[in-house]
Structures are given as C-alpha cells and as structure tokens.
Amino acid sequence: MLVTGGAGFIGANFVHYTVRKHPEHQITVLDALTYAGNEASLAPVRDRIEFVHGSVADAALVDRLVSGCDVVVHFAAESHNDNSLRDPSPFLTTNIVGTFTLLEAVRAHGVRYHHISTDEVYGDLELDDPAKFTPETPYNPSSPYSSTKAGSDLLVRAWVRSFGIHATISNCSNNYGPYQHVEKFIPRQITNVLSGLRPKLYGQGENVRDWIHVDDHNSAVHAILDRGRSGETYLIGADGEKNNREVLELILQLTGRPADAFDHVTDRVGHDLRYAIDATKLREELGWTPRYTRFRDGLAATIDWYRENEGWWRPQKEQVEAAYAARGQ
Ligand code: NAD
Ligand code: TDX
C-alpha cells in the first residue's frame, strides 16, 4: 500500500490505524515533509513501514513507487484554507498536479486508487437549512483550497470514465484528534490555552462544522478499500455538527478556564457558514458506524494528547501565531 501524505495529520493516523488493525499491509509512505509534515508523527510505527521523502508531483518517483504497489491511498495535500488565501500557488501544484501525476501512474500500472477529499467541495449550507451534503450535491467550492480539492476529485471521476481506472473517492467532514497541526482550529485553541494565550474565534463563531474523530474517518476509508464499488463517491461524517463557539466553550470548560476567556478576531474572508454530511450511503451500503459518538470524550482525549506531547507541537507554535497575528487573527 502506498500512502501519500502519511506524515500529515490524517495520513499518520491512518498509518497507525492500519499497522494496528490491518497488519497484512506492507506500507510505503510518500511525503514531501512540507511545514505540515512531521516524521515524528510516524515514530511509533517507523520500523513497520518504508518512508520515502518526495513529492506526489514528481512523475518519475511516483511512477516507480506506484509500479511496486497494489493500492494507493492519496492523503497528500495543501490542506489549510487560511494559507490558500495568502498564497494559492502550492495548492495548485500539490492538489491538482500531484493528483494528476498519481492518476497517470495508477493508469499505467493498473493499480487501485483511493482519493481522500473533503466536504468543502460542495460549498456551504445556510445555518437554518435542514439539508445536508449528499453524493448528489452539486460542486460549489468557495476557497482556493476547496476549489483545488474539487478539481482533483473531478480528475479522478474523468480518469474512471475515460480510462477505466479502479478508483473510489471519499469526502469527509472536519477531523479532530492527535497529530493535527497547530494552525487548525481545535489544536490552535488547545495549545493557546496550554501556552497561556487567549483562544481566537473568527467573527461571532456561528459557523458550523461537522466534527468526526480521525480514527472514524480512517475506519471508513478501510471500509471503502474493502467493500467500496469502483467509480463511487462515499461521504464520511458522524453527525457531529457544532458551531465554533460551542467547541471553543467546551475546550475552555475541559481545561478549567472561564467561558469568556477568548478573543474575537478578524473573520476569514469568504468564510463558509455550515458543513453537514449525510453518510447514509456509507452506513447502509458498507455497514460502517463511527466509534466516537460522544464529542466531549473525544475532545477531552485530544486535549490530554496535546498536554502530553508538547515536544511534538511546541516547535511550530510561535511561527504559526506570528503569521496569524500579522493578519489580525
Ligand atoms: P495535513 O496538512 O496535516 O498533511 C498533509 C501532508 O501532505 C503533510 O505531511 C505534507 O508534508 C504532505 N504533502 C504536502 N504536499 C505534498 C507533496 N507535494 N507531495 C507529498 N506530500 C505532500 O493535512 P490533513 O489534515 O492530514 O489532510 C489530509 C487529507 O485529508 C487532505 O487531502 C485533505 O484535503 C483531506 N481532508 C482533511 C480534513 C481535515 O479536517 N483535516 C477533512 C476532510 C478531508
Ligand atoms: O483560529 C481559528 N479560529 C476560528 O474560529 C481558526 C484556525 C479557525 N477558526 C474557524 C474557521 C472554521 O469555521 O474554525 C473553523 C475550522 O477551521 P479550520 O480548522 O481551519 O478548518 P476548515 O477551514 O473548516 O477546514 C478543515 O476541514 C475540512 C480542514 O482544514 C480541511 O483540510 C478540510 O478539508
């Protein structure tokens, strides 16, 4: 199994999960170790995998690695919306050209491909709309990040239709759990509290995200690898809708801070209002169910992980906060 982006948040958790639950797989990780990649995230499984430092946009390298495997699981991406508003360029190279490069290699070698994507490709929903995203929702991405992810999904669909590659796609909602970079909402606020800094809420915090524990995302990816039908798209979500203010207040409560001990900061430009996933197809067709159904417990465990692993996140913290501060966030 070739896992791209395996030194990032979800990819590293996927590698840990696979080594634990599916030890029959021989894993090679391909990761460019950008600012978001950290080899230390793979330390607990380092002797069980092969690690290759390189880019998914390097056609010769990708062709060689793909020729030696049975399945590719493609996590590698530029993943942060705020960064894509500052400089979209690497999002095009990694998310579009990188996916194209992998698709050409799996086409050449007849290798099965699974494409990891996001619910953000569907744009956003109104706060008071009972609707959720389904596999039939039209694509309508808002940011440079989500538009490059949408573009990469469409490449996969076209390669299935035009070249008959064996591929599946999953679009997942917001993940939380260990090893998530401190630029993202939940780890940023946890590590702010642990650093004696005030958490930062964009705008009024009414925007809703549909939170899922990273291990539930990864168990769904394995269900798709085992039983998913080629050419199909599966939406992954665990009915975890919460607005940002609620999430922040829970972090403050779980860390023993007053409910109002945070700052309102400049809102994100073009900030999507609400994401919500209807995962009926995944649940009914593949029999998948999430394990982390109590957000409070998953969040408390995540806070404990950041408390116990300061050495993992501390080196990035100052620089990330300086970049946010420069934009009033
Ligand atoms: P991340 O930013 O934590 O990790 C991305 C990894 O990809 C890093 O290790 C980085 O070094 C690597 N990478 C970047 N460019 C590369 C390149 N050109 N070649 C090889 N490796 C490269 O991201 P994440 O949050 O773990 O997201 C992983 C995937 O899941 C992405 O495709 C993202 O779109 C998708 N996704 C994320 C979420 C979420 O909530 N984080 C939700 C749904 C989908
Ligand atoms: O400091 C903050 N304060 C704040 O209020 C940050 C960093 C974020 N926010 C808000 C913005 C969003 O409404 O919190 C929410 C979550 O923000 P992010 O963690 O940046 O995630 P989001 O933009 O929702 O995208 C995430 O989920 C979908 C991942 O980063 C994407 O990779 C994935 O595709």
Image (tube, rainbow, N blue to C red):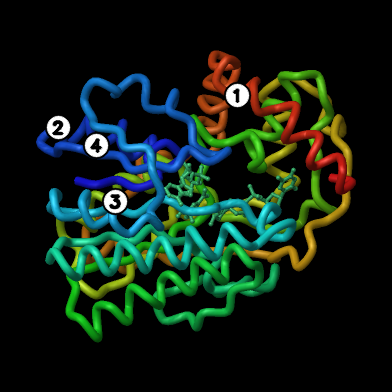
Contact, mark 4 vs mark 1 (Cβ under 8 Å): no
Q: Nearer the viewer, mark 4 or mark 1?
A: 1
The numbered mark, 3 or 4, whose residue comes first in the sequence reads 4
- Tell me the element at label 4: helix
Residue linked to disc 1: 313
Which residue does the image show at 51% across and 30% down from the upper left? 297
Residue nearest the viewer, comparing 114 with 99: 99
The numbered mark, 2 or 1, whose residue comes first in the sequence reads 2
Which residue does the image show at 31% across and 31% down from the upper left? 16
Which residue does the image show at 48% across and 53% down from the upper left? 77
Label 2 lies in ligand 1 vicinity (Cβ under 8 Å): no
Residue linked to disc 3: 61
Q: Nearer the viewer, mark 3 or mark 4?
A: 3
Residue linked to disc 4: 18
The numbered mark, 2 or 4, whose residue comes first in the sequence reads 4
Residue linked to disc 2: 23
Q: Quadrant of residue 124?
A: bottom right
Contact, mark 2 vs mark 4 (Cβ under 8 Å): no
The numbered dot on residue 131 is none
The numbered mark, 4 or 1, whose residue comes first in the sequence reads 4
At which x and y percent is residue 82? 70, 54
Residue that extends furthest to the front in the rendered view of this protein: 60
Label 4 lies in ligand 1 vicinity (Cβ under 8 Å): no
- Neighbour tally class for label 1: few under 14, some 14-19, many 20 plus, Cα within 10 Å: some
Q: Is residue 252 above or below residue 44?
A: below
Q: Amino acid at mark 1?
A: Trp
